[in-house]
Image: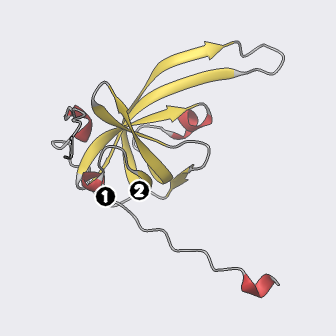
Amino acid sequence: MADSKPGLRKPVFTKVDQLRPGTSGHTLTVKVVNAKMVMQKGRPDGPQSRQMRIAECLVGDETGMVIFTARNDQVDLMKEGATVILRNAKIDMFKGSMRLAVDKWGRVEVTEPASFIVKEDNNLSLIEYELVNVVVE
């Protein structure tokens, strides 16, 4: 019975410049350019110590940069200069611009430092998108 289980697929790594609004299931290797805490709620001294933390991190590779929204435990991994692998990441839209996020179905892993230099003049989060409804007759 165990032999009939299909093998794990090898991840297909995406580059930052290939990201598009509304897409998901991306696996990327990126460097953290900077990280900024934007929200911290909850009491660390409470009974369950439930604390909600959100940080906006500028991440990128040799093709461009995008803002990554790190939540809770992900915030600790997103140190400036670190190289991380984002598995099963998705694109969220925030005020018309793209944000990369990893939810409970994905994973953020710190990996060995990458050799690429981040292309800082191509920030995809600065591009504003507008939802256009197309009526087909």
Residue 15's disc number: 1
Residue 103's place in the image compared with 19, above or below, is above
Residue at image position (62%, 35%) is 73
Q: Are marks 2 and 1 in contact (CB under 8 Å)?
A: yes
| Mark 2 vs 1, N-terminal side | 1
User: Residue 92 location, x and y as percent?
Assistant: 40, 37
Query: Which residue shows up at 72% across the image and 16% down it?
Result: 44
**Amino acid beneath label 2:** Leu
In screen coordinates, is 73 left or right of 120?
Answer: right
- The local secondary structure at tag 1 comes to loop
Would residue 82 be visible to someone looking at this image? no
Give the residue number, with chain letter if any, for mark 2.
28
Instruction: Pick the residue in front: 134 or 31.
Output: 134
What amino acid is found at the position of numbered circle 1 in the picture? Answer: Lys
Depth check, front residue: 87 or 60 = 87
The front one of 49 and 32 is 49
